[in-house]
Every structure is written in C-alpha cells, then in structure tokens.
Amino acid sequence: MLARQTQNKALQWLGRQLFNRDDPAAFFDPLLEQVNPMWVQQYTPALVKQIINETSDTKTLVLKPAAHWEGFEAGQHVNICVEIDGVRHDRTFSLSSAPALWKKQGLVTLTIKRLPGGLVTNWIHDRLEAGTTIGLKEAFGEFRLPATPRPILFIAGGSGITPILSMLETMAADDYRAPVTLLYFVRTSSDIIAREKLEALASRYPALTLTIIITHESDEPRYLRESDLQAVPGLKARDVYMCGPGGLMDLAGSQLQNLGVKEDSIHKTFFAAPATVLDGGAVGGTVQFAKSQVEVSSEGDANLLEMAEAAGLSPRYGCRMGICHQCSCRKTSGTVINRITGQSSGPGEENIQLCVSVPQGPVSVEA
C-alpha cells in the first residue's frame, strides 16, 4: 500500500509540473491502454479470466486485477468501469468470492444479475467476453463480519446472496465457531444462484444451517414469515445481515422488530438507495457549487449529485447509494435532507454526500 501511495504522489507531482493537474493518468492512459491495458493508472485494470453461467439471468465474472489492487474484506462492494460504444460507465457490484482467493491466486469474482433495461448489466451479459480487460476500483463498504465471532442470521433474496457468499466462504475457511443461519429466498428453483457452492458449504461447515425458500412455485406466494424467524435458535442474540429486494428487506425489518431484535443488531446492504418519501413542498432550493462557480435551482426532491450533473458538472461519485462516500464534499452553509434517513442536517459547515442529499432552501457546497 505504501508503494502505491508513493507512486500516486509521484504521478501527481508529474501532472502538476507538466499539465498543472493532479491526474496525469488522464493524459497517459489512452496511450498506455493501447500498449498494454494492464498498465492503466486511473483505475485498476482487471482481466476477465472466465465467465460462468449461474442461472438464465446471472453470470459470475472471474477477474484477475493488476497486482497493485489493494484487496477487500468479505461483504464489500467494488465499482467497475466498462466502455460501451465509446462511453465509460461505472457501476457498483458486491464481490462474491472470499478474500482468500485474491490473496492466494490473485483472483476475485463478481456475480451479476441482468437487470431489465440495465445498460451495463445487459452489456456484460450480451457482449463481455473472456480475455477482455475492464476497470476495477478499490473496495468499500461497511457490510462486514463482526470482529469477534457472534451468532449470525443471514437473510438474502435473489442476487442479494452475492456478498453473503463471500462472507460464508470466509467464515468456513476461518472456522467461524458461532452458529450461522441462512434464509435464502428465490422465485423458482432455477433461480438459485451458486446452488452447488451453497450446498457444499452446508455439508462441510457444521455451524451453517441453510434454508432455501422458493417463493413462486405454489398457488400462493411463499414469503418470509415470522415463524421462519422464530425457528432460528437464539434469534435475539444474533447479528442479522440482510441483502435483497426492498420488499424483502422491509418485511424482514418489520418482523424482526416485532420479535424484539434490536435495531443496532441489523446490518443491511442495498441494490439501490432506499428512499424516504419527502414532502415535495418542503424540499428544493438554490445550490451554489462554489468551486465550479455554478448555481442551480430545483423545486423537487432531486439530490445534489443529480443537480450538479444536470448543470453539466462532473463531480466524483461511486455507488450513488450513500455507501461508498466517494461523492462526499463540504457543505459550507444551508440545510440538506438525507434521502435515505429523512433527517435534516444542521445549517452550518459539515461533510455531506451529494448522492443522498436534497436541498432544503439555499445551500452552498465546496464542489
């Protein structure tokens, strides 16, 4: 890591000397990419070694990142960069492999479900081939295992199993001794992602209790029931990790609360930012982007990132879900509402995230 930091400082110095900029990679990368795609500096190049079909709409990419990539912890996300018709796009996905695969073989996996109408996921499914190089940024996210073993309940829906696969493989390899239960919900039996891997984990990892629930193969949909949760031994003493569609997450949260599970024991990660319904008459305002000397007005619940992009600005961002904090900047005055929690900020200076902050009256930010 120290060597990487030293390299970055050297590149920034070179950029200031040659171009009066801190990012010379923006100038050199197009040339480097033609010589060897694995030499690119703006992001970590990752070679697509293999593409595995998991289900009819889900594929796993086996990637070999360049050696300077810094690795990850089980449960974290990563942004990938792909070029589609000459335009570079960033998207966030969870890593589905255990960190041990990266440490031992220099490989990581991303398990990606096709989204109807999704530009990047459809391109990955239809056009990405083994031997291609894509971009990989550093891992982030707080959806991680506890520092010391505790009883755990995982609740996953569909492709929400992705970060949990990484966690389970890590726990099995580390001989995680506390009880672990997984409730995995899928629409049909053909939608089970990594079925063989899950069954293999359950057979060799005694602490794991695996339950796969098919929701749409009977006359009536079979959703999560309180009885499913009540059947988990020592439920109130468990940390709960959830990932899946919003409906499952909301239902699970409500039922866990009814059964007395403490809120601070529940950990969630999302496919998209969960949005609190805001009063349209109470939000909106004029935002001054001080560094860019641009002023933008909004009468709705657009967030600051959307407002900046609508004005032609290109602020840094990553997940667009309030997870990675890459769009964080300094608010110097005014009040914003957090789109996820619905809570208002103070009126003074503080750090905010552009992607989840909605103005409530005049706001000034250092962006």
Image: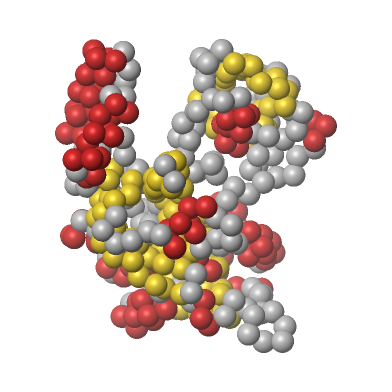
Q: Is residue 280 above or below residue 124?
A: above
Residue sitting at 39 percent across and 47 percent down? 82
Note whether residue 213 is visible.
Answer: yes
Question: Looking at the image, what colour scheme do you see?
Answer: secondary structure
Farthest residue to the bottom: give it.
218
Q: Is residue 228 visible?
A: no
Q: State the residue in front, 286 or 206.
A: 286
Quadrant location of the N terminus in the rendered image: top left
Please indicate whether residue 142 sits to the left or right of residue 35 in the image: right
90 with respect to 243 (left or right):
left
Where, by quadrant of the figure, is residue 286 drawn? top right
Residue 273 position in % (x across, y down): 59, 47
Query: Residue at 23% across / 24% down in the picture?
Result: 11
Q: Which residue of the protein is positioned furthest toward the front in this rendering?
A: 85
**In the displayed structure, would residue 224 be above or below residue 67?**
below
- Residue at figure coordinates x 75%, y 39% from the top left: 278
Q: Nearer the viewer, residue 149 or 203?
A: 203
Q: Is residue 165 above or below residue 364?
A: below
The x and y percentages for residue 208 are 40, 76
Name the residue nearer the viewer: 298 or 77: 298
User: Hey, which residue is sitting farthest right in the picture?
Assistant: 281
Could you tell whether 331 is left or right of 195 in the image? right
Q: Position of residue 294 (x, y in %)?
A: 59, 16
Q: Quadrant of residue 30?
A: top left
The residue depicted at 26 percent of the width and 19 percent of the height is: 15
